Image: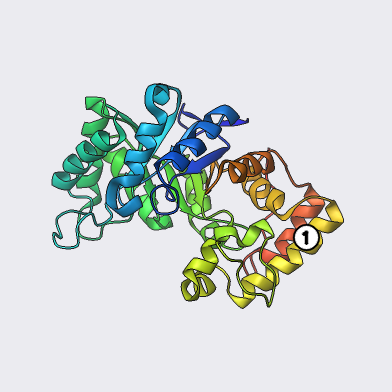
Amino acid sequence: MEYKNLGHSGLKVSVVGLGCMNFHTMNDDAESAAIVHTALELGVNLFDVADVYGDRGKSEEYLGRALGARRAEVVVATKFAGPMSSERLDMQGGSRRYVMQAVEASLQRLGTDYIDLYQIHFYDTNTPVEETLRALDDLVHQGKVRYIGCSNYNGWQITDAEWTARTANITPYVSAQNRYSLLTRDIEKDVVPVCEKFGLGILPYFPLESGLLTGKYKKDEPFPEGTRLNKWQQFAASAFASDDKVTKVEALKEVCQRYDHSLLDLAMGWLASRPQVSSVIAGVTSPTQLEQNVKAGEWRPGSQELEEIDEITALPAERFGPARS
């Protein structure tokens, strides 16, 4: 397993991380534990979850139980700010009051006394960024949180948070978790360069587009039974399997055939080769899928293949060169 620093911080994370969103929703307690134990055996040390996952809290509980006595060996990343109640509007967001409440609840569910990476799940337009950052800074000084990060921020929001942290002399974000894949490259417009400028490590989620980039889906054929895209149907078609994306996948498959590797290799290895990417967060539903992801994360594309990939998937009129070492 390869390990990278999380941005400019000293925190080392595995280049392939485990997304735990499927715990409770698609995997029961025992299945989730089997996935976690396989991850530990493979050298995966970054486990990403959120308080809203698994029917509001269950994913954190499953992860905490599965780690057990080995908790100190890993980097536990969780998130706050998503709605934790359908009745109470104050059970969400980035206010100081809620941050202090949310962290205690997550600590209890995870069965730990500290969180390695505490991330705000969504930008809160109703709370000043300094209020959120000061609350998180206090948690760092209290030892309940080691590092802080953001998720689903755009470029100017990351810049604003960085400027606020610097001028107020408080703890800054060290990471940005955003949707990023061969087929979803929008963050290359602003988030990627901003993270490079300020030293934030990028943690891509949905790197496989919920399975579309694994090669098991075929154009003009129904989604296979038991898959997430089959379960999600109409939502899946619009969010992950649009005609444009399916067409690009077919073109990427041809590239893979010419260079003699799998589409999964390409999806994971391409992201892992990005200089700003610290760890690729991929969710799985079985230990076998995790083993395949870890192996794929070891592969790296060459310069010629990178050019061909960009011809297929790069943003219009914006071509990005090969990854820098």
Question: How is this picture coloured?
Answer: rainbow
- In this rendering, position of residue 83 left or right of residue 63: left
- Is residue 304 found left or right of 47 in the rendered image? right
Callout 1: helix, strand or loop? helix
- Amino acid of disc 1: Glu
Residue displayed at 80% across by 63% down: 254
Residue 120 seen anywhere in this rendered image of the structure: yes
Q: Nearer the viewer, residue 322 or 237?
A: 237
* Residue 180 image position (x, y, % from top left): 54, 56
- Viewer-side residue, 44 vs 14: 44
- At a point 57% along the width and 28% down the height, the residue shown is 41
Residue appearing at x 17%, y 47% in the figure = 98
Q: Quadrant of residue 312?
A: bottom right
Closer-to-camera residue (302/131): 302
Q: Which residue is mark 1?
A: 308
Q: In this rendering, is residue 144 above or below 288?
A: above
53 left or right of 205 in image: left
Q: Residue at x 40, y 22 (%)?
A: 72
